[in-house]
Image (cartoon, rainbow, N blue to C red):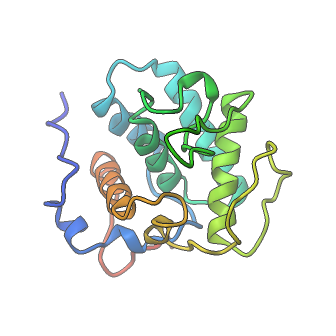
């Protein structure tokens, strides 16, 4: 049995140092598919294992195609959907894993035809905000970015670009720290980027 899940709180030493906020959106992740499963199921143990495996595979495939760090994208999905419980303005049938198109409490967000299309759009938007380059594949849907390219090269820059919550980057960095806890991924203060 796994130990209790670490609290997603400001008390984490890595969060206090703002370590993960500096991680670039572009790059390779270090979390394994199994580590992503362990992390996710600690916070939502009742979600379908087969659907979760499929979603993790989609995130890893689509992120690799675009050069986006899948760890950050996966953590953002966990945050935006409350570990696929949804319950906010977006529901599971929308295949919208990142709150895309939710500008206010009056907008339900974008709808995608399949989980792959929803994940692809999420990844493509992250790349758009992190890089001056466009997506390597045609845009998955009619969704287009609201802001210019290269506005958010690091996780910390998503605050104000992806979400208006002034604590958005801190919340995502806590998710990333927790993901790495469940992965036992080697992380050092000297090299917050993948080599």
Q: Position of residue 4 (x, y in %)?
A: 14, 36
Is residue 60 shown left or right of residue 47? Answer: right
Which residue is painted at 79% across and 66% down in the image? 134
Q: Split into 4 quadrants, where in the image is the N terminus?
A: top left
Is residue 4 shown left or right of residue 63? Answer: left
Find residue 46 and report its image quarter.
Answer: top left
In the foreground, 177 or 1? 177
In the foreground, 159 or 13? 159
Question: Furthest residue to the front?
Answer: 106
Q: Position of residue 58 (x, y in %)?
A: 63, 38
Which residue is painted at 27% across and 51% down in the image? 181
Number of numbered discs: 0
Q: Position of residue 174 (x, y in %)?
A: 30, 56
Q: Position of residue 74 (x, y in %)?
A: 49, 46
Q: Is residue 124 above or below residue 108?
A: below
Is residue 133 shown left or right of residue 161? Answer: right
Which residue is painted at 75% across and 47% down in the image? 143
Find residue 144 and report its image quarter.
Answer: bottom right
In the foreground, 69 or 83? 83
Is residue 11 shown left or right of residue 15? Answer: left
Q: Is residue 129 above or below residue 178?
A: below
Which residue is painted at 46% across and 57% down in the image? 30
Question: Furthest residue to the right?
Answer: 138
């Amino acid at each position: 049995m796994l130990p209790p899940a670490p609290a997603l709180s400001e008390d984490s030493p890595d969060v206090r140092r703002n370590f993960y906020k500096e991680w670039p959106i572009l790059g390779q992740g270090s979390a394994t598919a199994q580590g992503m499963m362990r992390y996710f199921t600690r916070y939502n143990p009742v979600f379908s294992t087969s659907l979760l495996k499929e979603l993790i595979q989609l995130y890893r495939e689509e992120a690799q195609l675009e050069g986006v760090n899948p760890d950050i994208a996966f953590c953002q999905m966990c945050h935006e959907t409350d570990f696929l419980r949804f319950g906010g303005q977006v529901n599971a049938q929308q295949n919208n894993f990142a709150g895309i198109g939710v500008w206010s409490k009056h907008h339900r967000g974008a709808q995608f035809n399949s989980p792959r299309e929803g994940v692809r759009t999420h990844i493509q938007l992250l790349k758009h905000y992190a890089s001056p380059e466009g997506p390597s594949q045609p845009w998955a849907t009619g969704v287009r970015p609201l802001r210019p390219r290269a506005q958010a090269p690091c996780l910390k820059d998503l605050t104000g670009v992806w979400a208006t919550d002034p604590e958005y980057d801190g919340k995502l960095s806590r998710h990333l720290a927790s993901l790495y806890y469940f992965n036992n991924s080697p992380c050092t203060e000297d090299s917050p980027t993948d080599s």
